[in-house]
Amino acid sequence: QVQLVESGGGLVQAGGSLRLSCAASGSIFSINAMGWYRQPPGKQRELVATITRGGSTNYEDSVKGRFTISRDNTNNTMYLQMNNLKPEDTAAYYCNANIVRSWGGRNDYWGQGTQVTVSS
């Protein structure tokens, strides 16, 4: 089995910072692209940022310059450093990873989500 677990969410005032983590565990051979998504209340899930295994990154326009995605391939972990948070960043944040399993095959996996709430 493969599992993704997010942590680091919470309540923060506007202008504050949070760091999300996503740890992958289980029967993992390798991890390709990883990404963070978010789902604001009453809205659809949207892409926040992605990172390839080699470290190339891509960001949604509204978070550019404020959020930084990174990963530790040795420990199968991904991070999202969020600075200068705004109330519109309030959402459930999910990690996603394209994982090659040690026993064969490849799938996209999702974490259970972590809530980020930014007060004004």
Image (cartoon, rainbow, N blue to C red):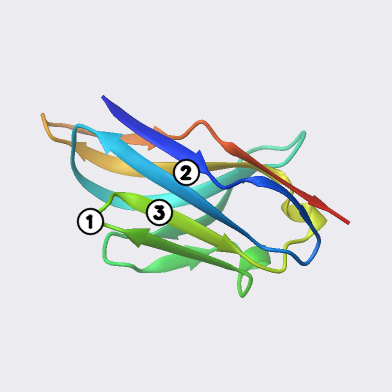
From the image, which quarter does the C terminus lie in? Answer: bottom right
Horizontal side of 100 relative to 9 (left or right) equals: left
Residue 113 position, x and y percent, is 55, 35
* Circle 3 residue: 78
Q: Kindly indicate whether the residue at mark 2 contacts the one at mark 1 (C-beta within 8 angstroms).
A: no
Per the model, the C-alpha gap separating discs 2 and 3 is 8 Å
Q: How crowded is the residue under tag 3: few (<14 C-alpha within 10 Å), some, or many (20+)?
A: many
* Circle 1 residue: 74
**Is 25 located above or below residue 55 in the figure?**
above
> Residue at the spot x=69%, y=43% of the render?
91
* Circle 2 residue: 95
From the image, which quarter does the N terminus lie in? Answer: top left
Amino acid type, mark 3: Met
Q: Kindly indicate whether the residue at mark 3 contacts the one at mark 2 (C-beta within 8 angstroms).
A: yes
- The earlier-in-sequence mark between 1 and 2 is 1
- The earlier-in-sequence mark between 2 and 3 is 3
> Residue at the spot x=33%, y=40% of the render?
24
Per the model, the C-alpha gap separating discs 3 and 1 is 11 Å
Quick one: SS at disc 2?
strand
